[in-house]
Image (spheres, helix red, strand yellow):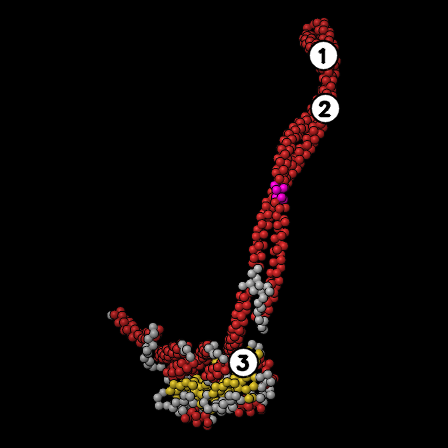
Amino acid sequence: VLQIGTLVTALIVGGISAIFANRLIYPILTATTAVKKLGQGNLETRILVEGEDELAILGSNINQMAEQLQHLLQEQTAEAERLKTLTNTLLSIRQALDSEELFNLTVKEARIALKADRVVIYQFNAECSGKVIAESVDFGFPIALQETIEDGCIDREIIEAYRKGRVLATHNVWEAGFSPEHLKLLNRLQVKANLVTPIIKDNQLFGFLIAHHCKEPHVWQAYEVNFLRQLAIQVGLTLERVSLLEVTQTLKDLAIHLSKTHNSQETYNFAVQNIRKALKVDRTIIYKINENFQGSVIAESIAGTWSCSFGAEIHDPCLKDYVEKYRQGRVVAISNIYQADLSKCYIQQLEAFEVKANLVAPILLGDKLLGLLIAHQCSQPRLWQQSEVDLFEQFARIVGLALERTNLLEQAEKGRLAAEQVSIEQRQQKEKLQLQLLKLIDDVEAASGGDLTVRADVTSGEIGTVADFFNSILENLREIVIQVKVAATEVNAAIADNSGAMNQLATQSLKQTQEIGHTLDAIDQMRFSITAVSKSAKQAAEVARTAYHAAETSGTAMDLTVENIMSLRETVGETAKKVKRLGESSQQISRVVGLINQIAMQTNLLAINTGIEANRAGEDAQGFAVIAEEVAVLAAQSSAATSEIEEIVANIQRETNQVVRAMELGTTQVVEGTRLVQNTKQSLNHILDVCRQIDRLVSSISTATVSQVQTSNEVSDLMQEIAKVSEMTSNSSRQVSSSLQKTVEISQQLQASVRTFKIS
């Protein structure tokens, strides 16, 4: 029973503990589940908070963190949408092709993105003035487009601040402390809050991009300020690009149109009109400068009802001080004539034409200053943009180039007119010359008929000179005809006298030719004989040369033979000496053999004595007896050997003596042969000298015969030339005779022809 009670108690305690533990763990599990859901992106998840214990504080913190995450996500989503809107807007305005499209697109997109009541672009012209050039406004609010606004609150410091990027955000214009004049302007446009951002172009303040809230004040958020600032920056950049395109197109159009003009005044008028429209100024003029540094307005284009300056004579005493600078390309831009530190007289000149701001650029023809291109802003001062100044300078250069072209065209036209006038004068002179020439031709035809008494009329000009020459020629021709008549008569008489002599000369020349032919045949025979002798002499020279070479070869062989015999003689002498030494050696051998023979005899005697002593000694000395016998045998053998050696040595001595005698006899014969060879060599040398002399003689004969052949050939050629000359003389004589006959005929014809001329 006790155990059962204990078990029941334990179960009850365990159940109570489980209940308490579950109540303690449940908030932790709930918080863990909520954190997991938040981590999965379910930011709507919240924890039910009860009590004020640590778990309740943890749940409250988790709920607060979820709310912050949800708010941050909403802000990021809104920022992404705003960034997307800004990107799309920037991309849209970048597509603009001209400034008007750029401005209209900018104000439209900005008003939609900012949900504003009005967005305008205000172009800043000069200090305290400007003009609304683009506007997007909600229905029911006043329109500010094209309105000129004077604002005295804008000073130089504010302009510089805007140029550096200042942005002005006004939440409530009535609480911003604006001046009464400015508040009056804002009230007229029903502005309650505004946001002003500068538009910077070419590093200068172009104007402002302004957003208005007109229904009620508005607290400008940071993203709105940043959006409008970025949009204004992009407008400035795009405006630079668009302005560059517009400038390029404007320059192109001006250059094309000016290239179609044909005179200077047309170029002036067209230039000022188009430049005024391109820059949107009130007046454009061209001021031409003379050599006295004075000038006048020669072309003008005016917008509206501003006063006319065309033809005005302007005397500027200070101009001569700036001519050189203008010639070097100086461009002057004055935004406000009253703030540019100008001289009083210059201001008075500008005031006479209602000028508030101006641009001045030189017009150059080559390196010469023609005049000035001037743009006037008369309505108000104007802050000239750098791009406008550069464009104006390019306009002036194009005008200068166009004027150079028109000057060339005008000069060409003047040249054409001068050429036409010269052509007319030349035609008139040609007609006059033709009349004089016809008269001269009539006189020439009369002279060509044989009348040498006719004379042409001498007038002024080229034809008169030709007529004078013609008269001189006729007079000279008349004298020549008279001389020809006399000469023809004399020629006929002379030819008659010389005709017989020429025939006789031809006959003698022919006979001389025949005799020369016979002489030429004899010379040919002599030449053939000399040629045969020359060939024989050449053959003899070859034979003599061959004998000379053979003798020379034999002499060389004899020299070698003498050398060999002398060498043999020396060899035999050496051999004889060696043989004699051999005989002497054999004699020494014989003496040695005699000594050996004596030793053998003594040895044999000693052996005999030893044997005798041994026999006396008995059996104890038998060993010595045997040795004595062997020694005796050796002595006998030595004696026999020495006897043989003596015989051999005796034979050697006999043969050696015979060899020595034979060598001495051979040496004697060699000496005799040497002497004979020396004699033979001397004979060959003598033969060699004779052959050499024969060769020289034959060569001389051959040379002489060759020279004779050449001489005979030259004589033959000379005789042939003489024969040809004689033949030519004969032919020439005949031709001269024939020519004389023809000359007689021609002389007779000449006399007949001369008779046709009338000389008196």
**Residue at the extreme left of the image, as rendered:** 1
- Find residue 363 and name its label: 3
Contact (Cβ within 8 Å) of mark 3 with mark 1: no
Q: Nearer the viewer, residue 463 or 482?
A: 482
Pointer 2 or 1: first along the chain:
1
Query: Residue at coordinates 62% horizontally, 33% vertically from top-left?
Result: 525
Q: Label 2: state its secondary structure.
A: helix
Identity of the amino acid at label 2? Ser
Q: Nearer the viewer, residue 589 or 309?
A: 309
Which one is in front in this view, the residue at disc 2 or the one at disc 3?
2
Local crowd size for mark 1, using a 10 Å CA cut-off: few (<14), some (14–19), many (≥20): few
Residue 614 x/y as whole percent? 71, 6
Pointer 2 or 3: first along the chain:
3
The residue that label 2 is drawn on is 683
Examine the residues drawn in magenta and state their main secondary structure.
helix
Q: Is residue 174 magenta?
A: no
Contact (Cβ within 8 Å) of mark 2 with mark 3: no
Residue 413 at least partly seen: yes
Identity of the amino acid at label 1? Arg
The residue that label 1 is drawn on is 654
Which residues fall within the magenta stretch?
504-510
Q: Label 1: state its secondary structure.
A: helix
Which one is in front in this view, the residue at disc 3 or the one at disc 1?
3
Query: Residue at coordinates 64% horizontally, 31% vertically from top-left?
Result: 529
Residue 188 x/y as whole percent? 41, 93
Query: Residue at coordinates 70% horizontally, 5% vertically from top-left?
Result: 615
Q: Label 3: state its secondary structure.
A: strand
Q: Toward which corner of the image does residue 194 lie, by quadrant?
A: bottom left
Pointer 3 or 1: first along the chain:
3
Identity of the amino acid at label 3? Ile
Q: Check the picture and name the quadrant holding the C terminus.
A: bottom right
